[in-house]
Image (cartoon, rainbow, N blue to C red):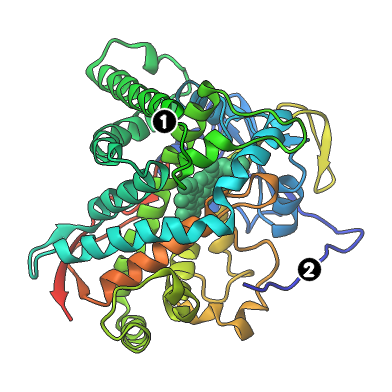
């Protein structure tokens, strides 16, 4: 999607502000904890870079796309870090998301080939089969939780793209059982400023530890099986096992492979599922967009199951998903931490400063998107998209840590929306209010909808 390049003027008069409403000791922690979306989206009105206090920590929210880019494109100075990443490390180990700058570059070189465009058609076969199976399984007229269904679908797709052997079925069952417990537990721990919650002998912690142990065991067993068989199966895990660092010739060891698999499961399943659920929610409330989508699907597919080769012609389908990612970006907030003294927006930041990057804030800023609350897939038509300010649409991040699964996720979502919407119309259940839940990803919570055959 083309975007207009906008360079900041050499001497930009950046506005710096302190977020209003901070309380003694806790600062903005309560507002951030209770209604983070409302709080964060109120901040660009105060400045281009806004300082907030979360307990005794200071954090900075860049609200201008040029400042966000400055942070994301300078990964050495603005490294991964902060309290959320610290708490993710015991779960994810040392994989792409948790590794620091020096090691990240090596890891990315090793994992990138698994996402090479040449491998996508093979992954897309899994996506096509699973999306078609999902859309066949529904029963007309019976309300069901679309969020859960999308979660199950993306878990099956990701597991079968990772592991193409018979083990996939067992893996899917375990992933579906364990992953929600792990994601929920990780979120609770990330939000706990004391760090004590994880140590309490309570049932929730026990369930979390057990789920993590089960998933780890499963991954270890699968990696062992693959090593013994020593065959390239064309799946993601085979790609990781055969990956060789072009600079040193080294390969990933078993622990590194384990950590990358865990990272891919945690990064790839919930994100895509949340965005898909939002797409159906938005279509259910925007009949004109739904009609336009159906017209495209009828013309391009003519009743066929959508496949990889159809994607270039599914323009409107892709615009629907692109716009859903704008309104409800699953990665609504992520962080960086400065490793040395640096300057942002003319402000000196000491080492250890936490930077909050919020695609949600950018995507809802009226100065960046006309009528930002409206669902308008056609804002992504090429002739309109070219006016979108560079760096203001960031559902997959940017720079060297940009989502490695962006094309995978877009392909999966396009095929899922096409497969489902070519068979079904999903109707909202009357008198239900759906609000975004800013947890690990920006989910819709339970999303009951009623499938009607088309
Ligand atoms: C619509 C779906 C998705 C969204 C919105 C999304 C969003 C993101 C974002 C914003 C980041 C950057 C975070 C940061 O800079 O700290 C990221 C990183 C990542 N994503 Fe995704 N993602 C999606 C799907 C996927 C899929 C399907 C996979 C894998 C199968 C995946 C794997 C990863 C990994 C491994 C990283 C870390 C990359 C690195 O640091 O080098 N994501 N994702």
Q: Vertical placement of 191 versus 360: above or below?
A: above
Question: Residue 318: in sight, yes or no?
Answer: yes
Secondary structure under badge 1? helix
Q: In this view, does 83 lie to the left or right of 447?
A: right
Q: Does the residue labelled 2 lie within 8 Å of ligand 1?
A: no
- Please rate how many residues cluster around mark 2, counting C-alpha atoms within 10 Å: few if below 14, some from 14 to 19, many from 20: few
How far across and how far down the image is residue 308, in percent? 43, 69
Q: Above or below — where is 161 with respect to 193?
A: below
Q: Mark 1 points at which residue?
A: 229
- Quadrant of residue 423 in the image? bottom left
Label 2: which secondary element: loop
The image quarter containing residue 375 is bottom left
Residue indicated by mark 2: 6
Residue 383 lies left or right of residue 427; in this view the side is right
Q: Residue at x 18, y 81 (%)?
A: 454
Observer-nearest of 349 and 166: 166
Q: How crowded is mark 1: few (under 14 residues within 10 Å), some or many (20 or more)?
A: few
Say whether disc 1 or disc 2 marks the residue closer to the N-terminus. Answer: 2
In the figure, residue 412 lies in which quadrant?
A: bottom left
- Label disc, if present, on residue 64 of the rendered structure: none
Task: Locate the N terminus and report the quarter of the image it occupies.
Answer: bottom right
Residue 166 to residue 117: above or below: above
Residue at horizontal 65 percent and vertical 35 percent from the top = 244
Judge left or right: residue 173 versus residue 29: left
From the viewer's side, name the closer residue of 50 and 132. Answer: 132
Q: Is residue 446 above or below residue 30?
A: below
In the image, residue 47 lies at what x, y percent?
Answer: 69, 54
Q: Do the residues labelled 1 and 2 touch (CB within 8 Å)?
A: no
- At a point 46% along the width and 18% down the height, the residue shown is 194
Select label 1 or label 2 by which is in front.
Answer: 1
At 28% from the left edge and 50% from the top edge, which residue is drawn? 445
CA distance separating discs 1 and 2: 52 Å
């Amino acid at each position: 999607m083309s975007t207009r390049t906008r360079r900041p003027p050499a001497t930009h008069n950046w506005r710096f502000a302190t977020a209003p409403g901070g309380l003694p000791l806790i600062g903005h922690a309560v507002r951030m904890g209770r209604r983070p979306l409302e709080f964060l989206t109120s901040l660009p009105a105060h400045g281009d870079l806004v300082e907030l206090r979360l307990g005794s920590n200071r954090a900075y929210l860049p609200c201008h796309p040029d400042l966000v880019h400055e942070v994301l494109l300078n990964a050495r100075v603005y490294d991964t870090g902060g309290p959320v990443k610290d708490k993710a490390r015991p779960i994810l180990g040392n994989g792409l998301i948790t590794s620091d700058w020096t090691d990240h570059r090596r890891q990315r070189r090793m994992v990138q080939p698994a996402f090479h465009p040449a491998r996508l058609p093979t992954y897309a076969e899994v996506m096509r089969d699973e999306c078609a199976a999902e859309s066949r399984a529904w029963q007309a007229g019976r309300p069901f939780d679309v969020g859960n269904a999308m979660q199950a679908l993306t878990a099956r797709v990701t597991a079968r793209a990772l592991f193409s052997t018979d083990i996939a079925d067992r893996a899917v069952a375990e992933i579906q059982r364990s992953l929600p417990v792990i994601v929920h537990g990780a979120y609770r721990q990330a939000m706990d400023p004391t760090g004590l919650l994880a140590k309490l002998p309570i049932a929730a912690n026990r369930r979390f530890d057990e789920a993590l142990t089960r998933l780890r065991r499963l991954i270890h067993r699968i990696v062992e099986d693959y090593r013994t068989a020593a065959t390239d199966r064309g799946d993601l895990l085979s790609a990781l096992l055969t990956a060789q660092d072009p600079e040193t010739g080294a390969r990933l060891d078993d622990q590194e492979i384990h950590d990358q698999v865990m990272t891919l499961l945690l990064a790839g399943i919930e994100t895509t599922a949340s965005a898909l659920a939002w797409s159906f929610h938005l279509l259910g409330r925007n009949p004109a967009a739904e009609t336009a989508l159906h017209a495209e699907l009828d013309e391009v597919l003519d009743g066929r199951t959508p496949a990889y080769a159809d994607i270039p012609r599914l323009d409107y389908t892709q615009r629907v998903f692109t716009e859903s990612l704008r309104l409800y970006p699953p990665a609504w907030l992520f962080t960086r931490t400065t490793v040395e003294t640096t300057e942002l927006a003319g402000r000196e930041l000491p080492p250890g400063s936490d930077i909050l990057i919020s695609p949600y804030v950018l995507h809802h800023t009226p100065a960046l998107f006309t009528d930002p609350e409206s669902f308008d897939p056609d804002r992504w038509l090429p002739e309109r998209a070219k006016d979108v300010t560079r760096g203001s649409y960031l559902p997959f991040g940017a720079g060297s840590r940009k989502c490695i699964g962006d094309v995978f996720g877009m392909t999966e979502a396009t095929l899922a929306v096409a497969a489902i919407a070519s068979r079904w119309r999903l109707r909202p259940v009357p008198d239900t209010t759906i609000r975004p839940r800013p947890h690990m990803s920006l989910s819709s919570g339970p999303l009951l909808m009623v499938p009607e055959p088309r």
